[in-house]
Image: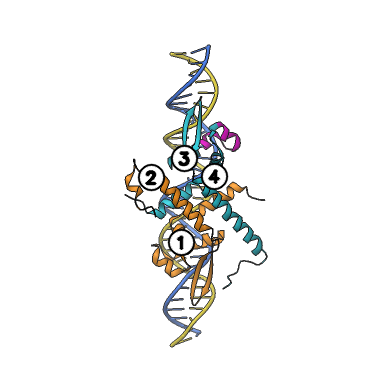
Chain colours: A cyan, B orange, C blue, D yellow
Amino acid sequence: MSVPLYQAKAEFFRTLGHPARIRILELLSDRDHAVHELLAEIAIEPSNLSQQLAVLRRTGLVASRRYDGEVIYSVSVPEVRDLLVAARQILGVMAASQADLEPELTRDIR
Amino acid sequence: MSVPLYQAKAEFFRTLGHPARIRILELLSDRDHAVHELLAEIAIEPSNLSQQLAVLRRTGLVASRRYDGEVIYSVSVPEVRDLLVAARQILGVMAASQADLEPELTRDIR
DNA sequence: TGTTCATGTGAAGAACTCTTCATCCAGCCT
DNA sequence: AGGCTGGATGAAGAGTTCTTCACATGAACA
């Protein structure tokens, strides 16, 4: 039962659609982190963090390994960094163009 | 009052997290489309399409103009194409690494 | 004016996602 | 074994998003 490609894409983007998961990916795309390190950076409950990590693990974006009594997470698809960069750029463009159009209420200009 | 950046990013990705909206963006990043053209490509109710277009309009990713009795939509941030390409690549990598477990998912990564 | 075509909107229930809580597991130490 | 530490899990209520329906709007034109 193969899922249509555009639906797979939508599901993929949805896994990125959560502030904690975005932060996790950004932290991990800088370097590997232990769970307690992530916990120190992101202000959520441990079990919530664990849930979000589980989401990312299930989709295969991150991988975990146990080392020295800790669980270390890492991004398993390095290309994720490119995606985050692209997203950052788009947000920049959108923020800029919103600042320009702010005075005029959004009207359709042919 | 300024929303944390990672939350803005999450919201941005969530607007991409819907099959219809992904298809719309892909169709539009190829060329501008009238609403009835989108409707012919995407199998959803007209009012549902309209809702999804409204979501994309609200976030500023697409713009609409009226021309010759039709409403024409276009992407207003060309960089979106780069993002879709990056996503496609990641999906390709992930599908490949899952090839052992789920061979049927790896077909036809465009 | 009335009618039709093309598109948009508000509202409501269904469906899904988040957060939290309680509990559980796995490895390590004595 | 027993107790610790660091994480993971399941379930349930709260919250959010989707889809559909019914109706609204605007342009064009008879």
Q: Label 1, label 3: how many angstroms apart (C-alpha)?
A: 29 Å
Q: Name the residue at 52% across, 48% down.
A: A82
Tell me the residue at 48%/62% (across/down).
B29
Q: Which residue is mark 2?
A: B96
Looking at the image, is mark 3 or mark 4 earlier in the sequence? 4
**CA gap, disc 2 to disc 1?**
26 Å
Q: Are marks 2 and 4 on the same chain?
A: no
- Say if mark 1 contacts mark 4, CB within 8 Å: no
Label 2 CA crowd tier, 10 Å (few <14, some 14–19, many 20+): some
Numbered range of the magenta stretch: A36-50
Cα distance, mark 2 to mark 4?
23 Å
Question: Which amino acid is tagged 1?
Answer: Ile
Mark 1, residue position: B24
D15 and B33: which is toward the camera = B33
* Sequence-earlier tag: 2 or 1: 1
Q: Residues within 10 Å of mark 3 (few under 14, many from 20)?
A: some
Q: Chain of mark 2?
A: B
Q: Where B60 falls versus A52 (above or below)?
A: below
According to the picture, the residue beneath numbered tag 3 turns out to be A76
Front-lying residue, A43 or B107 = B107
Q: Quadrant of residue D18?
A: bottom left
User: Residue under mark 1: which chain is it in?
Assistant: B
Q: Chain of mark 4?
A: A
Instruction: Please give the name of the residue rendered at 41% of the width and 64% of the height, measured from the top-left corner.
Output: B45
Residue at 45% over, 60% down: B26
Q: Which residue was labeled with disc 4?
A: A22
Q: Amino acid at mark 3?
A: Ser
Tell me where residue A46 appears, x and y as whole percent.
54, 33
Residue A68 is situated, as x and y percent measured from the top left of the image, at 51, 24
What amino acid type is highlighted by mark number 4? Ile
Magenta run includes residue A45: yes
Q: Say what secondary structure mark 2 lies in.
A: helix
